[in-house]
Amino acid sequence: MEIISLKEQASDAETAVQSDAYVVTAIKPQAGNNNRVNVFVNDEYDFSLDIAQVVDYKLKVKRCLTELELSELRNASEFGKLYQRALEKTLSRPHSIKEIRDYLDTKRKKRIAENKIAHNNRKKDKELVKKYKLKVKEQPIYSDETIKKIIGILVEKGYLDDRKFAEYYVANRNQKKGTSLKKLRLELNSKGISEEICEQVLAESGRNDVEEIKKIMKKKAKHYDMEKMTNYLIRQGFDYQLVRDLLQEQAELLGKD
């Protein structure tokens, strides 16, 4: 069922159809997503938009589009789909800004690869393309500006917040298993979290290397002797002297002094 009926628009003089024009011939609800619609141009599916975009662009059946307008609408479609994917990923669990930016960049690289395949497929035998349903339509490439805009919206709405992510990460990362604060700091840095936020969150977390070492010893003491435990803890980023002092205190637990 069309959202905007052909009958309702038939009287609009401004939408007179030209044989060589790009004409919106149908706007249909998208299966499984009530917030998006599929737009057909010249009786073929062309792109999809969310309801708000349909309103913003004043899109209706029988509207004639210039090539520039059609390109703008296709770009808006791609923006809407990419934003929706980013939003879904962001809401699945807390993420850092860098994680989502990397995720969107991966999507862009995938699109570039798909377009290369599509370009090559167009050179192949048409019957072969049809038989094996090879992808032949190239898609718009996501721009830096598009990715920047999506990140900006997610930050503005509070869906992306590096401090909240850091708090979540420190509260859940190896909480029972134990890990050094140095390792936590390096992991946060790799996810784009600033040194300032790292220091604040780690200080407020209540986690410290003494307790973290004790967690690890409790888990591994039965299998590690003094030397092996020392080497392991140092590799995990703990201070050498702190490790030695604590292991001397726990020598009986390790079975050696």
Image (spheres, rainbow, N blue to C red):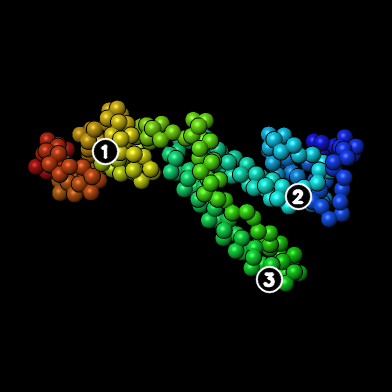
In terms of image quadrants, where is residue 134?
bottom right
Label 2: element kind:
loop
Label pair 3/2, CB-CB below 8 angstroms: no
| Amino acid on which the number 1 mark rests in the picture | Leu
| Cα–Cα gap, marks 2 and 1 | 59 Å
Q: Position of residue 140 (x, y in %)?
A: 62, 54
Residue to which mark 2 is pinned: 66
Q: Considering the image in quadrants, where does the N terminus appear?
A: top right
Q: Which mark is residue 181?
A: 1
Q: Position of residue 214 (x, y in %)?
A: 22, 35
In terms of image quadrants, where is residue 54?
top right
The residue depicted at 70 percent of the width and 50 percent of the height is 68
The residue depicted at 69 percent of the width and 67 percent of the height is 122
Instruction: Estimate how packed mark 1 is, as few (under 14), some (14 to 19) or many (20 or more) residues with alpha carbons within 10 Å.
Output: many
Q: Nearer the viewer, mark 2 or mark 1?
A: 2
Q: Considering the image in quadrants, where does the C terminus appear?
A: top left
